[in-house]
Amino acid sequence: MEKLLKNDHHGVIAQFNAIQAIEPTTLHIHPEMQQVLNSHPKVFDKPHKLPPSRGEHDHRITLDPGAQPLNVCPYRYPFTQKNEI
């Protein structure tokens, strides 16, 4: 495209997006699943901030002040394991 434009050719780029309105539907949840959702409301509540607090199970990685990232080569792995990694 750039090569054509440099040679005094003209071009037009257009992007079309389909917009479809979706009617809200009622979601049927199995009663046993609803019981689990009701018994743990804090875990399954919609998040109000990022990341949502999980109480005593919050995870964080503490860094040493002034620490630099390690500069090491990544592990070598066989080609057959590439998709799995």
Image (cartoon, rainbow, N blue to C red):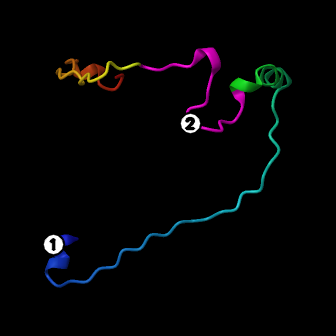
Q: Residue at x 76, y 21 (%)?
A: 40
Q: Which residue is mark 1?
A: 3
Q: Going by the picture, which residue comes out furthest to the top?
A: 56
Q: Nearer the viewer, residue 2 or 48?
A: 48
Q: Residue at x 77, y 25 (%)?
A: 41
Asked if residue 14 is positioned above or below residue 8 in the image, the reply reads above
* Precedes in sequence: disc 1 or disc 2: 1
Q: Is residue 24 magenta?
A: no
Q: Is residue 60 magenta?
A: yes
Can you give x and y, in whole percent of width and height, for residue 65 in the image? 31, 22
Q: Residue at x 42, y 19 (%)?
A: 61
In the rendering, which numbered label is found on residue 42? none
Q: Amino acid at mark 2?
A: Leu
Q: Quadrant of residue 7?
A: bottom left
Q: Which residue is mark 2?
A: 50
Can you give x and y, in whole percent of width and height, for residue 36 in the image? 78, 20
SS assignment at label 2: loop
Q: Residue at x 63, y 22 (%)?
A: 54
Asked if residue 20 is positioned above or below residue 48 in the image, the reply reads below
Q: Is residue 29 left or right of residue 14?
A: right
Q: Is residue 35 left or right of residue 20?
A: right
Tell me the magenta residue range.
Answer: 44-61
Q: Going by the picture, which residue comes out furthest to the front?
A: 65
Task: Tell me if mark 1 has few (under 14), some (14-19) or many (20+) residues whose alpha carbon lies within 10 angstroms of its own.
Answer: few
Q: Which quadrant of the figure contains the N terminus? A: bottom left
Can you give x and y, in whole percent of width and height, for residue 63 in the image? 35, 20
